[in-house]
Image: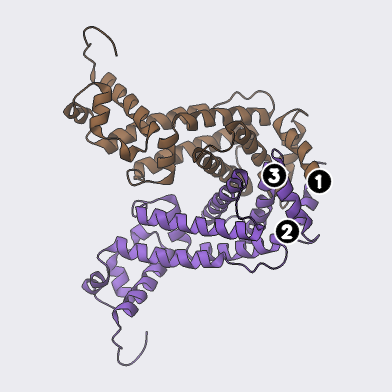
Chain colours: A brown, B purple
């Protein structure tokens, strides 16, 4: 709230303000539970004025989701410096930051509640998954991924999503543990694929050889033997 | 097609026939592309008669999905005999049989196309996931799962789903390899969780000690050391 005379906003500025207000509300509670009246009230404008900028709640929801998707995709960008395991761990931290900030909205979206599931929202979800996939391949230095690598990377991305959703449901496990766990899971799923395929085994050796002894990938390799005893 | 006089079906018999015909069509192509006319024609009855039994395509789709869900959940049932890894591999084979039989419909459903995503379809999907979860816990002999075990099992179930979806998109990897890979992934994700948690480590040791040297779990353990060289 600013004191004094309210400045008149331009069209695009008002749209951006409404998107921000809506995203805040959609993030904190399931989007089904957020009304246009509430958004209008939080933005300090009338309900008809909201409809002047957005024809309905779905279009405002989609605009808010677009902003959140761009935000999340941007968090996947990581400098190509240092060990891969450490890079992935930093990205996992930023991913859980995002999930933490947008918990109820993220859950409702990914679980496919009634207000979501439009072709636009599905396309936005897919675009974020694709951004994650492209980033991971670029860090692996692979431009033309074999089918098994594509499967490992894409199925690991879905594992990260489901892990975040399960975490949100009660937050019974410290998120820092899950961030490390997902980095370890990436190495483990690569190893599982490599156990059946020579090309994946070669990729895995290349990754492992570049990892330092104190990185998260080596950390897992160091802990596993103790489990077998 | 039977020759001779067409027998008049009772109401429930006709409903079940329509569900079977619809499930067949919804399995082979995306449900969006299947019309009521086509279902009527395949069932050998008129379009108005289809509407007599089902008020619309969604209700027929939901009934077909209910039958498919019951079928899939039944395939998770496995005798509590022999090593866990071998049991899980048999279930994975039946899971891929199901995915193979219902490919396009399974993809459309799980990717959340426009004709799907109702609260009924979401509830059916959740009920199948829950059936898988309950079966796995019963085979592990766990009645009150700690949070980390729940996370491993539920996130592995989502990994199995995404693996099947990626397989369906081009079938570029032999399904038998992926069936083994998912069994290995279960062991690997349990190991990853166990690397950070003593309770999971104890569970993992209990499982590993009961596995035979020629089972799929031991098979993975035998292959991994070769990757590190």
Q: Earlier in the sequence, mark 1 or mark 3?
A: 3
Residue position marked by numbered label 1 in the rendering = B225
Residue A43 locus on image (x, y percent): 27, 22
Q: Is residue B185 above or below residue B24?
A: above
Q: Which of marks 2 and 3 is nearer the N terminus?
A: 3
Q: Is residue A80 above or below residue B25?
A: above
Residue B74 locus on image (x, y percent): 52, 67
Mark 1 and mark 3 in contact? Answer it, CB < 8 Å.
no
Q: Is mark 3 on a helix, strand or loop?
A: helix
Residue B172 locus on image (x, y percent): 59, 55
Q: Residue at 29% of width from left, 63% of height from top?
A: B57
State the mark number for residue A63.
Answer: none
Residue A202 locus on image (x, y percent): 74, 42
Report the Cα–Cα distance between label 1 and label 3.
25 Å
Q: Is residue A159 above or below residue A29?
A: below
- Disc 1 or disc 3, which is closer to the eye? 3
Residue position marked by numbered label 2 in the rendering = B216
Q: How crowded is mark 1: few (under 14 residues within 10 Å), some or many (20 or more)?
A: few
The foreground one among A70 and A144 is: A70
Residue position marked by numbered label 3 in the rendering = B199
Report the Cα–Cα distance between label 1 and label 2.
15 Å
Q: Mark 2 lies on which chain?
A: B
Q: Is mark 2 on a helix, strand or loop?
A: helix
Q: What element carries label 1?
A: helix
Same chain for marks 1 and 2?
yes
């Amino acid at each position: 709230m600013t004191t004094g005379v309210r400045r008149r906003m331009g069209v695009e500025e008002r749209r951006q303000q409404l998107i921000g207000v809506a995203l805040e509300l959609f993030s904190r509670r399931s989007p089904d539970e957020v009304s246009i009246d509430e958004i209008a009230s939080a933005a300090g404008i009338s309900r008809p004025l909201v409809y002047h900028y957005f024809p309905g709640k779905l279009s405002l929801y989609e605009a808010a989701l677009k902003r959140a998707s761009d935000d999340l995709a941007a968090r996947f960008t990581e400098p190509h410096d240092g060990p891969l395991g450490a890079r992935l761990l930093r990205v996992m931290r930023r991913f859980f930051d995002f999930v933490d900030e947008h918990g109820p909205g993220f859950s409702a979206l990914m679980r496919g509640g009634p207000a979501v599931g439009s072709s636009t929202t599905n396309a936005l979800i897919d675009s974020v998954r694709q951004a994650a996939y492209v980033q991971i391949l670029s860090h692996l230095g692979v431009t033309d991924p074999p089918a098994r690598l594509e499967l490992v990377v894409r199925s690991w991305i879905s594992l990260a999503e489901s892990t975040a959703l399960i975490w949100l449901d009660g937050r019974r496990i410290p998120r820092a543990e899950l961030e490390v766990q997902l980095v370890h899971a990436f190495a483990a799923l690569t190893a599982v694929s490599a156990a059946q395929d020579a090309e994946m085994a070669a990729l895995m050796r290349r990754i492992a050889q570049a990892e330092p002894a104190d990185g998260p990938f080596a950390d897992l390799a160091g802990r596993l033997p103790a489990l077998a005893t």
